[in-house]
Amino acid sequence: ALSAYAAADRYYEAALELSDDPHLGLAYGRSLGAGGPSSSDGRAEPVLARAVPQLLALGDAPAAAEGEMLLGTAEWMRGQRDAAGARFERAVALVADAPVSRAKVFVLSEAAKYEFLAGRAEAAIRLCEELLPMVEELGLDDRVPDLLSTLGSSRATLGDREGLALLEHAIAL
């Protein structure tokens, strides 16, 4: 059934009780949108906090980076900017040498967004420009609107009129 979020949540929680697979904890955090408007109760955070070191121990740095980014987002939303910034930095470091993947694109595009929101438009632009070829290589069309929005907003903030065209394109997508 569509919009059966409560049922899905119960199934995830039951699965978490039966498994110690940290990938399941990461999926749970993603499903609740840790840090987003739908996750104000913070249920995903302890699960993600357990999953991140386990993922690192398994050698899955990109998945651990995703978990760090989700935890950082939750901290950012609570106004804990310094803690969030430290998590974002760890997440970016974890994927720095990783091959191109959906997880790396997620982490870097979220990092670009938060660079912009923190008033560091130049850093956001550098990340976005690094990301565009990755997104194209992987065919991640679902990431393009967010990426163009961040890039356009960052450029417009610096007075680059091309930024407005990028925002219009992001809206059109």
Image (cartoon, rainbow, N blue to C red):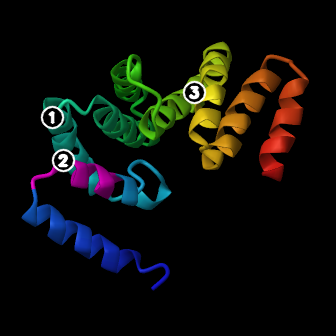
Residue 9 in the magenta stretch? The answer is no
Marks counted in the figure total: 3
Q: Judging from the image, what secondary structure is the residue with disc 1 in?
A: loop
Q: Judging from the image, what secondary structure is the residue with disc 3 in?
A: helix
Question: Relative to residue 2, is residue 148 drawn left or right?
Answer: right
- Residue annotated with mark 3: 112
| N-terminal label among 2 and 3 | 2
- Residue annotated with mark 1: 58
Tags 2 and 3 touching, CB below 8 Å? no
| N-terminal label among 2 and 1 | 2
Q: CA distance from mark 2 to mark 1?
A: 9 Å
Question: Relative to residue 151, is residue 5 drawn left or right?
Answer: left
- Residue annotated with mark 2: 22
* 144 or 51: nearer the viewer: 144
Question: How many neighbours does mark 3 have within 10 angstroms: few (below 14), some (14-19), or many (20 or more)?
Answer: many
Residue 23 in the magenta stretch? The answer is yes
Q: Nearer the viewer, mark 1 or mark 3?
A: 1
Q: Which residues are magenta?
A: 20-29
Q: Judging from the image, what secondary structure is the residue with disc 2 in?
A: helix
Residue 82 badge: none
Q: Nearer the viewer, mark 2 or mark 1?
A: 1
Residue displayed at 65% across by 35% down? 136
